[in-house]
Image: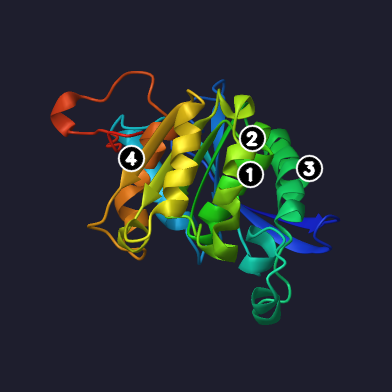
Amino acid sequence: MSHTIESSVLHERRTVTVVLPPSYAKQPERKYPMLFVIDGGVEQDLLHVAGVAQLGAMWGRSGDAIVVGIETKDRRRELVGPTADPELLKKYPTAGQSAAFRRFLATEVRPVIERTYRANGKAVVIGESLAGLFIVETYMDQPELFDGYAAIDPSLWWDKEALSRRGSAAIGRKQADKRLYLAMAKEQSEEPAAMRRLADKAAATGAHFCLAERPDLTHATIYQQLSPQALQFLLPPAEPPAPEFGFEVKCSPKS
C-alpha cells in the first residue's frame, strides 16, 4: 500500500510504501511493531527487506512487523549531515540535510503509519551504505526516534569519518536502552578505524549491541546476507527459534 505525503518539511511530495505481515488480516486485535526501511522505495531495498521480514516471521526467526518503506530521492541531501569540506560541497552541492529528513520521518511519516495501521508504538530501522550512515547519525543525535537500529556497512568514510569521530561525545546514557546492530564488509574491514571507534563507544553503553565483521562479504553482497540476522536482532521472536534451523545472530567477540 502506498501513501503520498505532501511534506511541509521537505517541500515536496513523497511516497511511503507499507507491506503488512500475512497475519495482519487474520488477527484483527493484534498490534505490530514498525520496521522502517531507509532507501525503501519499491525499486530500492523495500522488496528485499519485506521478503526477509515475512520469511523470518514464518520460520520463527524474527517477529512480525509492519514494514514501512521510505523512498529516497537525493541520497546525499537526505542521508548525510552538514559538511564543511569544500570538495564534497562542490561535488554534492545539495548534501547535508539529514536533520530535515529525520523531521520528515518523525513528524509526517510516523503519525500517518500509527494513525492508519495497528502499530504498537515500537519502531526499528534498517538501511545500508549511506542509509546506514543516516541510521548511525540518528542513533547518535536522536536515539528516541527508534527502539532499534541496524546499519549495514554504513558509509562511515564520508566527510573524513567525521561522524564516528564525534561518537565519543554523542553516545552515552541516551542510547542505553536501544538495540544497535552494525555490520562491516570487506572494504571497511581493511580500514576499520571508524567502525572501531563507533563500536567501542556503543559497547561501553551497556546497550544491546552487535558488531558483525564479515571480511568474506563485500559492500555489494552484505545486505542480502546479513539482513535476516539484523531483523532477528531487532525483532526477536517471542519464543527462541528451533535450534535445528541454525538461526543465530553472529557478533564479533568484541561486541
Q: From the image, tell me which residue sits under label 3.
A: 107
Q: Determine whether 165 is above or below 169 in the image.
A: below
**Real-space Cα distance between discs 3 and 2?**
15 Å
**Real-space Cα distance between discs 1 and 3?**
15 Å
Quarter of the image for the C terminus: give it.
Answer: top left
In the image, is 224 to the left or to the right of 208?
A: left
Q: Nearer the viewer, residue 35 or 216?
A: 216
Viewer-nearest of discs 2 and 4: 2
Image location (x, y in percent) of residue 41: 56, 61
At a point 61% along the width and 60% down the height, the residue shown is 71
User: Which label's residue is closer to the chain start, 3 or 2?
Assistant: 3
Q: Amino acid at mark 4?
A: Gln
Disc 1 secondary structure class: helix
Report whether residue 73 is seen.
no
Q: From the image, tell me which residue sits under label 1.
A: 138
Q: Amino acid at mark 2?
A: Pro
Q: From the image, tell me which residue sits under label 4.
A: 229
At a point 54% along the width and 22% down the height, the residue shown is 30
**Real-space Cα distance between discs 2 and 4?**
22 Å
At a point 38% along the width and 35% down the height, the residue shown is 210
**Real-space Cα distance between discs 1 and 2?**
6 Å
Contact check, label 1 and label 2, Cβ < 8 Å: yes
Contact check, label 1 and label 3, Cβ < 8 Å: no
Q: Which of the 4 quarters of the picture holds residue 63?
A: top left
Image location (x, y in percent) of residue 202: 49, 34
Q: From the image, tell me which residue sits under label 2.
A: 143
